[in-house]
Image: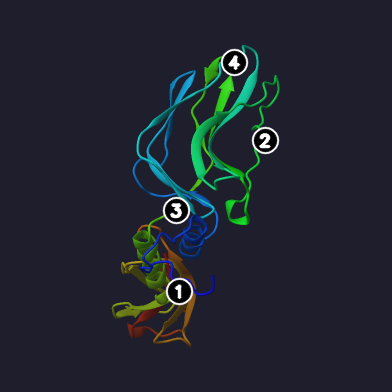
Amino acid sequence: MAFDGVFAFQGKDHITASQLGRIVEGVAGKGRYVLPTLNQMTAEMQTANKVRVGTGDLVMDGRVVTNETAVDLTVESGTSGYKRNDLVVCRYTKNASTGVENFAAEVVKGTPTTGTAADPEVTEGDISAGSASAVMPLWRIPLDGINAGTPVKLFDAVSPLSTIAAETKKLGDSVSRPLFKTVKYTSPKTDVGSGNVLEYNGTLKNIKGYTPVGIVETNTNHDWSFGLMRATLNGDGTFTCTWMNFNKNTWRGSIGYATVLYIRS
């Protein structure tokens, strides 16, 4: 049907699962992920033969699946001397006759091995493309002998729009700040005799969001007579610049200048 109003009153049942699925994919993006709701489909081993899948909501090819009550699933016993990977999955099936879609959690048993265990093969399918069955792996249960290890998460979790908006603003604020800043420091006046030094020990300014990385320029009010001997950041919030007076005269009221480069943290 061309130009059919989905969220519109038509006086009859008319919204289809495929329509809602496309809308979800168009707004939230294609793929499979768990939403930040309830317990986010946690998985905890209750015994070596029982895993509990917590409450939560997931999106599987545009279909929103909810689990409002924790579900206990059976894990077959391991074999001494062998390793095995089992998968906790969400399985989708569609009845070819009625078109009814169903979702269920189950454990897919892996193959025991004396080497490195591999996940069992599953046909993931694509509901949006018309697959009558599909599988979304949620957790891996590693078994070593008769012992079941801690479940390993296999799904992606998405952030709510409020979090994404806040992070985007934070990133924008960071980018909008200049990458570099420079601060020019001026020493007190002092008299420097011939062959003596003008030493400037300064305290670095604390600029929020920036870190001092080096001294990029130095000079004095007697540049033709003074030569730079040292310019360093000391690592304790201070810096030192030293110039020597190579002139035969004493320069009174000598001043040193240092420009420090700060980079955005």
Q: Residue at x 56, y 19 (%)?
A: 76
Q: Earlier in the sequence, mark 2 or mark 1?
A: 2
Task: Tell me which numbered mark, 3 or 2, is placed earlier along the sequence.
Answer: 2
Q: Which residue is mark 4?
A: 145
Residue nearest the observer in this picture, 164 or 97: 97
Closer to the chain start, of discs 1 and 3, is: 3
**In this rendering, would 87 be left or right of 64?**
right
- In percent of the image, x 71 and y 23: which residue is there? 115
Where, quadrant-wise, is the C terminus in this rendering?
Answer: bottom left
Quadrant of residue 195 within the rendered picture: bottom left
Where is residue 94, by image quadrant? Answer: top right
User: Sequence-wise, which precedes: disc 1 or disc 4?
Assistant: 4
Q: CA distance from mark 2 to mark 1?
A: 49 Å
Query: Secondary structure under badge 4?
Result: loop
Residue placed under numbered mark 2 in the picture: 121
Residue type, mark 1 in image:
Leu
Query: How packed is label 4: few (under 14 Cα within 10 Å), some, or many (20 or more)?
Result: some
CB under 8 Å between callouts 1 and 3? no
Residue behind mark 3: 158
Regarding residue 62, the answer to whether it shows in the image is: yes
Q: Nearer the viewer, mark 4 or mark 2?
A: 2
Q: How much space separates mark 4 and mark 2, taking CA atoms?
A: 21 Å
Q: Which residue is mark 1?
A: 179
- Name the mark on residue 57: none
Residue found at the far left of this picture: 188
> With respect to residue 261, does 255 lie above or below?
below
Amino acid at circle 3: Val
Say what amino acid the circle numbered 4 marks. Answer: Gly
Give coordinates of residue 5: x percent, y percent: 43, 71
Judge by depth and name the residue closer to the eye, 256 or 100: 100
Q: CA distance from mark 1 to mark 4?
A: 55 Å
